[in-house]
Image (spheres, grey):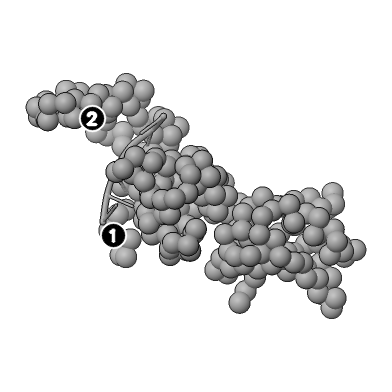
DNA sequence: AGCACA
């Protein structure tokens, strides 16, 4: 595999990120960008010399991570193509969500690290109680997968395709909604086809964030906007 | 290039 032979993981590891971006902004942007693939449990980014330019995004579902790895591969993010793989290990937030890692284990891990830093390793390992708990049986924790998107998603780009609009929607209404997000360019309604619209942003990063923010927005009680990337 | 959870 191009992803470097790392087995699927709920968490994705992203590298080649623009190191000039402040940590908080980076995390927010990653959150926005990737929540189009499913629920995100945590985003981790550190600015230490060893870890800058990298981040972890932990999803609730492995399938979200898989789609993200494929579809967002090389996505130009702050002018640099993201390199995405599965994370090598399980995120703490997932471990304590599924109970495969007790709080003591967590602490032990940190102690190990601290010790190694001080003395180098002494090869001493005490409790190996986490052996069998790593794999969570065959239990699909996500049996209720109600993914309504059966169609193939278009690659991220600067233009959004909006569906399920009430027929009386005007471009002024849509503009009001979308222009609150940075990078907004214009709204285009299709006269011949009521109920759909195109909304253009400066680039795919900004369109992605608006999509995430407004996905499913109830423009009327019976109309929830369905937003996807426009097909090229 | 670089796989953590301050």
Which secondary structure lies at badge 2? helix
Residue pushed farthest right? Answer: A168
Query: Can the viewer see residue A12?
Result: no
Looking at the figure, which quarter contains the N terminus of chain A?
Answer: bottom left
Question: Is label 1 in a helix, a strand or a loop?
Answer: loop
First of labels 2, 1 by sequence position = 1
Disc 2 designates what residue?
A: A113
Asked if A34 appears above or below A115 in the picture, the reply is: below
Circle 1 residue: A4
Q: Chain letter for mark 2, please.
A: A
- Residue A158, given in percent of the width and then of the height, sits at 62, 67
Q: Which quarter of the picture shows residue A147?
A: bottom right
Residue at 39%, 40% in the rendered image: A46
Along the horizontal axis of the image, is A224 left or right of A168?
left
- Residue visible at 31% across and 23% down in the picture: A107
A174 on left or right of A141: right
Task: Judge by depth and name the residue closer to the eye, A167 or A16.
Answer: A16
Residue pictured at 79% horizontal, 50% vertical: A218
Residue drawn at x 30%, y 54% is A6
- Can you name the residue that lies furthest to the left here? A122
Residue A193's place in the image compared with A222, above or below, is: below
- Whole-percent x, y for residue A76 in the image: 48, 63
Vertical arrangement, residue A61 with respect to residue A132, above or below: below
């Amino acid at each position: 595999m191009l992803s470097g032979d790392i087995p699927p993981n709920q968490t994705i590891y992203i590298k080649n990120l623009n190191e000039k971006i402040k940590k908080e902004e980076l995390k927010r942007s990653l959150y926005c960008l990737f929540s189009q693939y499913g629920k995100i449990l945590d985003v981790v980014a550190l600015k230490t010399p060893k870890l800058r330019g990298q981040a972890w995004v932990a999803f609730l579902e492995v399938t979200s991570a898989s789609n993200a790895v494929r579809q967002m591969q090389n996505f130009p993010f702050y002018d640099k193509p993201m390199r995405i793989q599965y994370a090598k290990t399980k995120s703490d937030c997932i471990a304590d969500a599924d109970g495969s890692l007790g709080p003591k284990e967590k602490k032990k891990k940190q102690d190990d690290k601290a010790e190694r830093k001080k003395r180098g390793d002494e090869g001493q390992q005490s409790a190996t109680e986490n052996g069998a708990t790593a794999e969570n049986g065959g239990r699909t924790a996500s049996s209720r997968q109600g993914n309504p998107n059966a169609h193939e998603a278009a690659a991220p780009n600067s233009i959004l395709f909006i569906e399920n609009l009430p027929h009386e929607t005007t471009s002024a209404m849509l503009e009001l909604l979308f222009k609150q997000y940075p990078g907004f360019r214009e709204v285009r309604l299709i006269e011949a086809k009521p109920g759909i619209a195109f909304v253009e942003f400066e680039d795919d990063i900004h369109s992605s964030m608006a999509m995430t923010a407004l996905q499913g927005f109830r423009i009327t009680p019976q109309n929830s906007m369905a937003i996807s990337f426009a097909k090229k």
